[in-house]
Amino acid sequence: MENKEIDKKLESKNVKPTAMRTLVYKTLAETGKALSLADLEQRFEKVERSTIFRALKTFEENFIVHPVDDGSGSVKYAVCDDECTCNIHDLHVHFYCTRCGRTRCMKELPIPNIKLPEGYTYDNAQFIINGVCPRCD
Amino acid sequence: MENKEIDKKLESKNVKPTAMRTLVYKTLAETGKALSLADLEQRFEKVERSTIFRALKTFEENFIVHPVDDGSGSVKYAVCDDECTCNIHDLHVHFYCTRCGRTRCMKELPIPNIKLPEGYTYDNAQFIINGVCPRCD
DNA sequence: ATTAACTTTGCAATAGTGTTGCACTAACTT
DNA sequence: AAGTTAGTGCAACACTATTGCAAAGTTAAT
């Protein structure tokens, strides 16, 4: 993905594209997986943890990435689709491979509609499936 | 719940009932919610974190409690049903209230059956719904 | 262009969760 | 009762997430 393209994308979501943000976004988009802060940190070496952290938070607030808590101990982040507003209708299943630790967005599997008992309202959900991915099988 | 009853239960799952374990189990069973290590720690004051921690791990290994990672930052634990073997068929939805931070097992809502793409196998899942519970509404 | 105002970044420090080694004590075995 | 095993408390530590502050970079206004 071109840097210019990324910058446009960020701007379209009201986030000023800086070198670091572009880099973080690019990495997330190119790997196509959900990555944790530590994952990202390793990939660049030079960049400060807090800088990446704040980039992710900014992205999250502006619906550029969504957080995935796969139970691995650290929250991971994956790029949202263009139309994503991170509301309940955009949610999808995530698959966590217990062998390689990789987390994959299963955008083709939307979170099933659940009928909660009387009195409960919801606005978000996480559906993590743990198992073994084809690569590790 | 009687202590004797608890002790029987623990023994039936091959866990030796000690004073601490009985206490931890009792608390989990009586509150009827999923509690974190920190939650439990607060309730007793006197008892060591690591002791509670190890009690929970022991319970988990022996299918006496199941862990719930509701995204609050700390894993919580809830008592299993009698017949629970913590395999994929025993799994149920958990509801995390974003106002009060309480996590409730929705045993009446089993995790829906998901058809994964070719090549993926699974053995566990977490389905957390975030919203507001009746108490907080 | 220069200064002022604001934003982003890097660094250092901190809080909280989870986890382990070790020594001490309690419980169980023979 | 002596020896072995299991459980507990304490202290230490690793790691993730998070924040305050100061330096550097960017933008806007004169």
Image (cartoon, coloured by chain):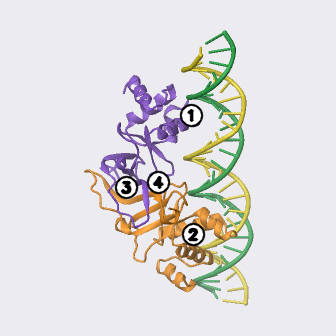
Chain colours: A orange, B purple, C yellow, D green
Q: Residue furthest left?
A: A118
Task: Please name the residue shown 55% across and 37% down the image.
Answer: B54
| Residue on which the image places disc 4 | B71
Residue B129's disc number: 3
**Foreground residue, A14 or C28?**
C28
Q: Chain of mark 4?
A: B
Q: Residue under circle 2?
A: A55
Say what secondary structure mark 4 lies in. loop
Amino acid at circle 2: Ala
| Helix, strand or loop at mark 1 | helix
Q: Share a chain, discs 2 and 4?
A: no
Quadrant where the N terminus of chain B lies? top left
Residue C21, percent across and down? 70, 38
Amino acid type, residue under disc 1 in the picture: Thr
Residue flagged by tag 4: what amino acid is it?
Gly
Which mark sits nearer the N-terminus, 1 or 3? 1
Task: Return the mark for residue B51.
Answer: 1
Per the image, label 3 sits on a secondary structure element best described as strand
Estimate the spatial distance between the alpha carbons at disc 3 and disc 2, rounded to whole Å: 26 Å
Are the residues flagged by discs 1 and 4 in contact, CB closer than 8 Å?
Answer: no
Instruction: Say which of A29 and A135 sits in front.
Output: A135
